């Protein structure tokens, strides 16, 4: 599944564990629906998400796997799309209306 990052929340503490902090990433999927995932800096899969977080909102991705209709599997291997033809599926005008400022630190 393809998608594009629309928002990334600042690093925040988990309600379940005082020692765990995470970034919440929000996506618009190619189907038109929305999804989210959490990326935890201390987890091994964070290396997959760090370039996405650094890319910020507007970063287009391939190979997203859904756990349910609104949750991207944080253990999937997202690939940043760089080919213009693959990015054309997204309505950038619509996304820019909901775009938020990218994080300055990841």
Image (spheres, rainbow, N blue to C red):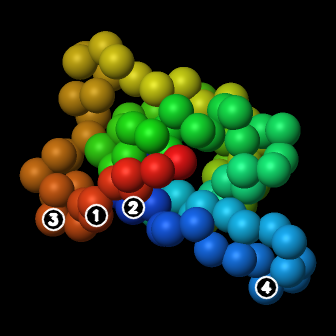
Q: Counting residues from the N terminus, which is met first, the one under dot 3 or under dot 2?
A: 2
How much space separates mark 3 and mark 4, taking CA atoms? 30 Å
Q: Is residue 92 among the parts visible in the rendering?
A: yes
How much space separates mark 1 and mark 4, taking CA atoms? 24 Å
On the image, numbered disc 1 is attached to which residue? 100
Q: Is residue 17 above or below residue 64?
A: below
- The residue tagged with tag 3: helix, strand or loop? helix
Q: Nearer the viewer, mark 3 or mark 4?
A: 4
Q: Is residue 38 left or right of residue 61?
A: right
On the image, numbered disc 2 is attached to which residue? 7
Percent across and percent down for residue 73 are: 73, 49
Q: Is residue 63 above or below residue 72?
A: above
- The residue tagged with tag 4: helix, strand or loop? loop
Q: Nearer the viewer, mark 2 or mark 4?
A: 4
Q: Which residue is located at x 66 percent, y 32 percent?
A: 48
On the image, numbered disc 4 is attached to which residue? 15
Foreground pick, 85 / 20: 20
Determine contact: label 3, label 1, CB under 8 Å: no
Q: Which residue is located at x 63 percent, y 74 percent?
A: 12
- The residue tagged with tag 2: helix, strand or loop? strand
How much space separates mark 2 and mark 4, taking CA atoms? 21 Å
Determine contact: label 1, label 2, CB under 8 Å: yes
Residue density around tag 2, few if under 14, some if 14–19, many if 20 or more, within 10 Å: many
How much space separates mark 3 and mark 2, taking CA atoms? 11 Å
Q: Is residue 12 above or below residue 48?
A: below
- In the picture, the disc for residue 97 is 3
Q: Nearer the viewer, mark 3 or mark 1?
A: 1
Q: Is residue 25 left or right of residue 22?
A: left
Q: Which residue is located at x 26 percent, y 41 percent?
A: 90
Foreground pick, 67 / 53: 53
Foreground pick, 93 / 1: 93
């Amino acid at each position: 599944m393809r998608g594009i990052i629309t928002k990334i929340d600042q690093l925040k503490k988990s309600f379940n564990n005082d020692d765990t902090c995470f970034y919440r990433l929000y996506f618009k999927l190619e189907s038109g629906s929305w999804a989210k995932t959490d990326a935890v800096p201390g987890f091994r899969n964070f290396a997959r998400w760090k370039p996405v977080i650094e890319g910020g909102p507007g970063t287009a991705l391939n190979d997203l796997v859904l756990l349910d209709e609104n949750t991207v599997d944080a253990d999937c291997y997202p690939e940043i799309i760089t080919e213009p033809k693959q990015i054309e599926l997204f309505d950038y005008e619509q996304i820019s209306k909901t775009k938020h400022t990218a994080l300055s630190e990841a």
